[in-house]
Image (spheres, rainbow, N blue to C red):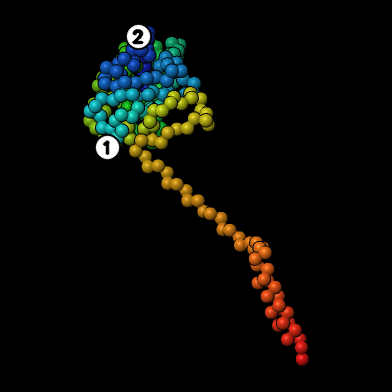
């Protein structure tokens, strides 16, 4: 099942990338944003990529020294002030906001990608004076409450390590899909079993050699004698 998380940004949107990355750093992470992306604009291809270079030492890791690649769908649009509010949207407790951000991770997501999605949305809400909303909740949270809630979930422990089935960070993927980019093997996932190569059966072929000639002559001789004896009364 996919998870959709929204951020409703308040008025403080200046230097958004630098402030959000610094806020993540203050929590013990060292994170970089794809150099061709920004929190303030929809990325080409629709996916936002983050490299996680360091994580807090208290987090359970399979490969603690390995940098990780986290990704999630990301879209941001400016609120149209002419569009009236409805009973369904925005969620309860959301007050004035200037931009709406929606993000999504698909089923099968790694723990790292989910928490980077949730933490990014919470920090965007907190840094701008806005609101955070997960589709499974009945109302929105303030940015400050959202950050505290995500950290509590992260630090309460899960059955999976933070980097379980996360992609190692080896290079930035292209924002628009390209068949030339090879995704690395996820951490902790068994490598696919090699496909057994079945050798084709070799057909027997006779190769003549001059050394075979005496045997051939002898065989023909005995064959001729047999035919003569068979037809001689």
Disc 1 packing (10 Å; few <14; some 14–19; many ≥20): few
Q: Would residue 207 appear left or right of 100 to someone viewing this image?
A: right
Which residue corresponds to the image point at 45% horizontal and 32% vertical from the top-left?
183
- Position of residue 99 measured from the top left corner of the image (x, y, whole percent): 40, 14
Q: CA distance from mark 2 to mark 1?
A: 37 Å
Which residue corresponds to the image point at 32% horizontal and 27% vertical from the top-left?
115
Which residue corresponds to the image point at 42% horizontal and 16% vertical from the top-left?
38
- Position of residue 138 measured from the top left corner of the image (x, y, whole percent): 31, 26
Can residue 135 be seen?
no
Quadrant where the N terminus is found in the figure: top left
Q: Is residue 228 above or below residue 32?
A: below
Viewer-proximal residue, 190 or 208? 208
Quickly name the residue at label 2. 12
For residue 159, the mark is 1
Q: Quadrant of residue 216?
A: bottom right
Query: What secondary structure is marked by label 1?
Result: loop
- Position of residue 119 measured from the top left corner of the image (x, y, whole percent): 32, 22
Which residue corresponds to the image point at 34% horizontal and 38% vertical from the top-left?
188
Query: What secondary structure is marked by label 2?
Result: loop
Can residue 63 be seen?
yes
């Amino acid at each position: 099942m996919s998870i959709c998380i929204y951020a409703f940004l308040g008025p403080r949107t200046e230097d958004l990338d630098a402030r959000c990355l610094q806020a993540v750093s203050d929590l013990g992470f060292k994170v970089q944003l794809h150099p061709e992306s920004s929190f303030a604009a929809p990325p080409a291809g629709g996916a936002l990529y983050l490299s996680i270079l360091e994580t807090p030492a208290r987090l359970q890791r399979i490969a603690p020294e390995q940098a990780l690649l986290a990704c999630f769908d990301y879209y941001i649009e400016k609120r149209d002030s002419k569009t009236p509010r409805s009973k369904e949207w925005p969620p309860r407790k959301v007050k004035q906001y200037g931009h709406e951000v929606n993000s999504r991770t698909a089923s099968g997501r790694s723990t790292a990608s989910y928490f980077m999605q949730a933490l990014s949305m919470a920090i965007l809400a907190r840094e701008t004076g806005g609101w955070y909303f997960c589709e499974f909740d009945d109302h929105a949270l303030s940015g400050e409450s959202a950050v505290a809630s995500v950290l509590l979930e992260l630090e309460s422990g899960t059955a999976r390590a933070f980097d379980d089935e996360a992609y190692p960070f080896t290079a930035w993927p292209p924002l628009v899909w390209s068949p030339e980019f090879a995704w690395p093997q996820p951490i902790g996932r068994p490598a696919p079993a090699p496909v057994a190569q079945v050798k084709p059966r070799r057909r027997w072929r006779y190769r003549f050699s001059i050394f075979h000639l005496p045997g051939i002559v002898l065989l023909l001789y005995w064959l001729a004698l047999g035919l003569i004896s068979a037809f001689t009364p």
